[in-house]
Structures are given as structure tokens and as C-alpha cells.
Image (cartoon, grey):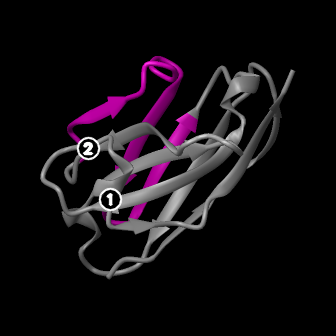
Amino acid sequence: QVQLVESGGGLVQAGGSLRLSCAASGRTFSSYVMGWFRQVPGKEREFVAGISWSGDSTSYADSVKGRFTISRDNAKNTVYLQMDSLKPEDTAVYYCAATMKYTIVVRLRLYDYWGQGTQVTVSS
């Protein structure tokens, strides 16, 4: 069982930066592939970024590639999402998720645990 708690969301102007954190409970955090997703009202939750259990492999949605960076610190049971050059279309509720799959997966149904989400709002 893993409990996930996101933090770091807020309001930022276009071009600015935010760093989201996701703190996980449990002693097996390093066994989970982690992902970040986002959702806006009326749309499906979409994959943003994923990271392997060791942190040596990452994957990004095309819409954020080159602007967002996912990382993890297994000693702190935390995964991060550094978001730079933010755009108004990045506005969404951001969720972190954990999966027992061996590789990074983009389908949200393959994730086993979810956080409650944190709001990110980018003003133009």
C-alpha cells in the first residue's frame, strides 16, 4: 500500500516555473514506477511524465518535452516535477501516481495508487 501526497501547485505567470513534489508513504517506494498526470475539467486525465524505479529512465508527453523534468529521490520517498517555461495550456490539476509495472506506462488505468492532486494555474 502506498499513499501519495502532492504539493507545490499554485498560480504562476506564463514563462514562469513551478516544482511539484509527491511524497510517498511506505518502505517500498523504490519499487514503483512513478508518473505525473494532469486533468482539466471536461477532459480525460493525461500522461505528463514517468520515471523508472531507479530514476535512470524517463518519458514525457510531447506537449511538455524540453520544458518539464521528472526526477525522484528514493531516500526521501519523493518524486518531483520541475516545470519551466509554463504556458496557459499547462493549467490543470496535477496528479502523481505509482505503478508496480516494470516499465514506464502512459495508460492511467495501469497505475495502482494516486494522490489527491494539486492545482496549477498559469496566467497569460
Label 1, residues with CA under 10 Å away: few <14, some 14-19, many ≥20:
some
Mark 1 and mark 2 in contact? Answer it, CB < 8 Å: yes
> Magenta region: which residues?
55-82
From the top left corner, tell me how far across and down residue 112 is, in percent.
32, 67
Q: Is residue 36 above or below residue 117?
A: above
Relative vertical location of residue 108 with respect to residue 123 in this rendering, above or below: below
Q: Which residue is mark 2?
A: 105
Q: Position of residue 10 (x, y in %)?
A: 78, 48
Disc 1 secondary structure class: loop
If you read the primary sequence from the N terminus, does the residue marked by circle 1 or circle 2 appear first?
Answer: 2
Query: Where, by quadrant of the figure, is residue 6 drawn?
Result: bottom right
Tell me if 92 is positioned left or right of 5 in this view. Answer: right
CA distance separating discs 1 and 2: 8 Å
Whether residue 84 sits left or right of residue 70 in the image: it is right
Tag 2: amino acid: Val
Name the residue carrying label 1: 111
Q: Amino acid at mark 1?
A: Tyr
> Residue at 21% of width from left, 54% of height from top?
53
The image position of residue 93, as x and y in percent, is 66, 49
